[in-house]
């Protein structure tokens, strides 16, 4: 069944967009990257661990810490997992997908750090005993930390947990009676007592090595525990509204979930099907569905041919483009139990019906959509975007846009405070920062003080400004959902090159920093000029080039060149995180015999008086 596509309550053409001639479609596959496929073997670059810095944005002081690193740089195919959890006790838990090796990333798992009056040392080992990916972390009211992720394309979901005060993690599988694998989970904590866990995922699609489940290629599954994961009273749950009569299946990472008390909500951000939200007011017993974007063709299968009833986004005279979500969105339940949804805006087309399941999206679309229940079904508004900084009336970008397959202003995350004020982080492209080939993305914060009725869209804060170096790529940001004591907590992934190594651009592999920001909520109304202070540094600040390794990769001998005065502590960690060298050095040159070391990626750490530089060293005999 097809009908004319309803016109959104906003117009993207009112926002800064790329020129019409740059509105060119690009290929995209319906299947997400599962993380078990072989990846490109590319040369390594140098990484680093930063110290605490304070970025002053007028009256806004943003405290920044590098809390971890990863070689594996795909944190999500679309929507960002729940990667940060905070509690009233002031303890903040952070998780991310981490690997410090090259493909096939055999050490991949959950990188974890905790803030309790300060961050712990950056981790070099995953918290699980098995290879995992895509962690989602929560804290229950009892103080238990719980991480859920997937362990493979044909396995149950993996759960890792520890109670308050415990030093070690326990782990096990979430029960399932299905033989199909489960991938890309999302988890929220709620319930009247704050100890319920709600988990959604999809069955492994055929394109990722799985099989159809109940007529769907990637069926959405639901799991619930009311005791913090000790037992599960709902497993392999499915929804009648989402069965094969309404959806052919769902894509990996194209959904998000949040809970507060007995209100639970999850949203699904589709391309050629309805984008919608499911809401439960009884802790997951019953659910209602509301459509956010009504896709005009029901049960559309890629390559079967769409009618020309869409819009003409690229002004080519053919009405073959269809508006929908870009797959990367967030959902949030506030203190009033109101449900809020945000996602990157996108146009799609499927004009080539012979390309084997591939369709097209428009990388140059700029706009972040917002919806709440008061707006009604199939009605949204734009609340944020990438800025036309040079005021040329268009976004003037390099021809090549880094491949994240999302909007130019996307990857959102949401939070709120006790007054119901809403906060949305998003990653937006900067037309003024470029590598010479691609433009960089920064993380912005936009907020509403009236429950989503109005937003400071014109004055969103760039909380990751390039101050000393005009070349930081900032993506996959995640807010802790509760803003307490006037403080927002946010983590994101940062490196020096737009795009990814694991998929998309397949850039040369390098260390990516996982960065935590602490941001005062009351400073978001006034942010523009930026200064940088580093009050915690001791003595002369090191530069990255003060520590060098030659050759790299190496087979037999490596020269460690130090432009550092005095004694330094040298530590070398092997690919599984064990210390293979730990000694003091007081010389400008040290020669390391690595002929007996196994092949792999090592971390070379040089530390002095609280300052630290970490370099990667690849051993290949």
Image: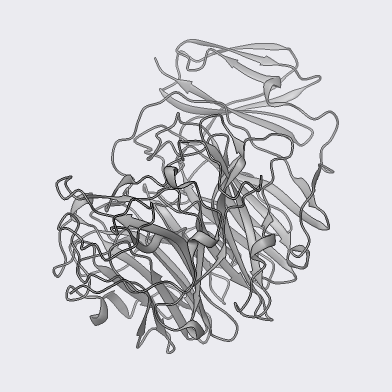
- Where residue 422 sits, quadrant-wise, is bottom right
- Where residue 491 sits, quadrant-wise, is bottom right
Q: How many marks?
A: 0
Q: Quick one: 352 or 479, which is closer to the camera?
A: 352
Residue 403's place in the image compared with 444, above or below, is above
Task: Please state, as top left, top right, bottom left or bottom right, where the N terminus lies in the image.
Answer: bottom left
In this image, 212 relative to 459: left or right? left
Q: Quick one: 350 or 155, which is closer to the camera?
A: 350
Task: Answer whether residue 540 is visible to the viewer in this image.
Answer: yes
Q: Quick one: 584 or 203, which is closer to the camera?
A: 203
Task: Answer whether residue 170 is visible to the viewer in this image.
Answer: no
Residue 334's place in the image compared with 13, above or below, is below
Residue 556 lies, in percent from the top left, at 47, 10
Residue 575 lies, in percent from the top left, at 46, 32
In this image, 306 relative to 330: left or right? left
- Seen at 76% across and 57% down, the residue is 527
Question: What scheme was used to colour the molecule?
Answer: one colour
Residue 71 lies, in percent from the top left, at 48, 37
Task: Please state, as top left, top right, bottom left or bottom right, where the C terminus lies in the image.
Answer: top left
Toward the front, the furthest residue is 317
Q: Quick one: 546 or 125, which is closer to the camera?
A: 546
- Seen at 41% across and 58% down, the residue is 346
- Where residue 203 sits, quadrant-wise, is bottom left
Residue 103 lies, in percent from the top left, at 36, 33
- Seen at 73% across and 26% down, the residue is 543
């Amino acid at each position: 069944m097809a009908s004319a596509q309803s016109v959104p309550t906003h117009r993207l053409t009112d926002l800064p967009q790329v020129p019409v001639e740059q509105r060119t479609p690009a290929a995209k596959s319906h299947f997400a990257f599962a993380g078990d496929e072989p990846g490109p073997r590319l040369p390594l670059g140098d990484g680093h661990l930063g110290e605490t810095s304070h970025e002053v944005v007028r009256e806004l002081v943003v405290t920044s810490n590098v809390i971890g690193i990863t070689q594996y740089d795909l944190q999500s195919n679309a929507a960002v997992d729940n990667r940060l959890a905070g509690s009233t006790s002031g303890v903040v838990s952070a998780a991310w997908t981490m690997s410090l090796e090259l493909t096939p990333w055999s050490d991949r798992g959950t990188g974890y750090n905790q803030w309790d009056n300060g961050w712990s040392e950056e981790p070099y080992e995953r918290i699980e005993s098995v290879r995992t990916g895509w962690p989602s972390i929560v804290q229950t009211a009892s103080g238990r930390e719980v991480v859920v992720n997937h362990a493979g394309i044909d396995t149950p979901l993996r759960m890792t947990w520890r109670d308050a005060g415990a030093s070690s993690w326990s782990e096990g599988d979430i029960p399932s009676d299905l033989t199909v694998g489960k991938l890309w989970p999302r988890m929220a904590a709620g319930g009247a007592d704050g100890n319920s866990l709600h988990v959604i995922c999809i069955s492994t699609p055929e394109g990722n090595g799985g099989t159809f489940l109940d007529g769907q290629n990637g069926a959405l599954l639901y799991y619930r525990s009311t005791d913090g994961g000790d037992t599960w009273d709902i497993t392999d749950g499915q929804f009648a509204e989402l069965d094969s009569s309404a959806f052919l299946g769902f894509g990996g990472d194209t959904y998000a979930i949040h809970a507060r008390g007995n209100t639970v909500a999850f949203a699904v951000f589709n391309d050629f099907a309805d984008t919608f939200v499911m809401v439960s007011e009884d802790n997951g017993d019953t659910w209602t569905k509301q459509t956010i974007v009504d896709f005009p063709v029901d049960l559309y299968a890629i390559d079967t041919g769409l009618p020309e009833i869409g819009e003409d986004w690229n002004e080519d005279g053919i009405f073959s483009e269809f508006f929908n979500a870009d797959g990367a969105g967030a959902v949030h339940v506030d203190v009033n139990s109101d449900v809020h949804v945000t996602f990157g805006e996108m146009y799609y087309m499927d004009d080539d019906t012979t390309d084997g399941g591939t369709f097209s999206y428009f990388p140059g679309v700029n706009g972040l959509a917002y919806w709440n229940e008061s707006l009604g079904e199939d009605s949204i508004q734009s609340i944020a975007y990438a800025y036309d900084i040079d005021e040329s009336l268009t976004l003037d970008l390099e021809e090549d846009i880094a491949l994240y397959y999302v909007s130019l202003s996307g990857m959102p995350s949401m939070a709120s405070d006790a007054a119901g004020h809403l906060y949305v982080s998003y990653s937006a492209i900067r037309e003024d920062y470029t590598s010479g080939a691609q433009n960089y993305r920064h993380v912005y914060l936009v907020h509403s003080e009236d429950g989503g009725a109005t937003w400071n869209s014109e004055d969103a804060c760039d909380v990751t400004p390039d101050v000393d170096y005009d070349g930081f790529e900032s993506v996959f940001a995640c807010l802790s959902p509760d803003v307490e004591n006037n403080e927002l907590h946010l983590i994101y992934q940062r490196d020096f090159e737009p795009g990814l190594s694991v998929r998309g651009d397949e850039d040369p592999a390098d260390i990516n920093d996982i960065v935590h920001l602490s941001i005062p909520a009351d400073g978001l109304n006034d942010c523009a000029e930026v200064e940088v202070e580093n009050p915690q540094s001791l003595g002369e600040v090191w530069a990255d080039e003060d520590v060098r390794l030659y050759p790299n990769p190496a087979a037999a001998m490596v020269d460690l060149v130090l432009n550092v005065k005095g004694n330094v502590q040298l530590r070398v960690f092997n690919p599984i995180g064990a210390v293979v060298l730990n000694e003091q050095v007081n010389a400008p040159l040290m020669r390391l015999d690595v002929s007996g070391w196994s092949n792999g990626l090592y971390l070379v750490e040089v530390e002095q008086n609280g300052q630290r530089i970490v370099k990667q060293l690849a051993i290949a005999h």
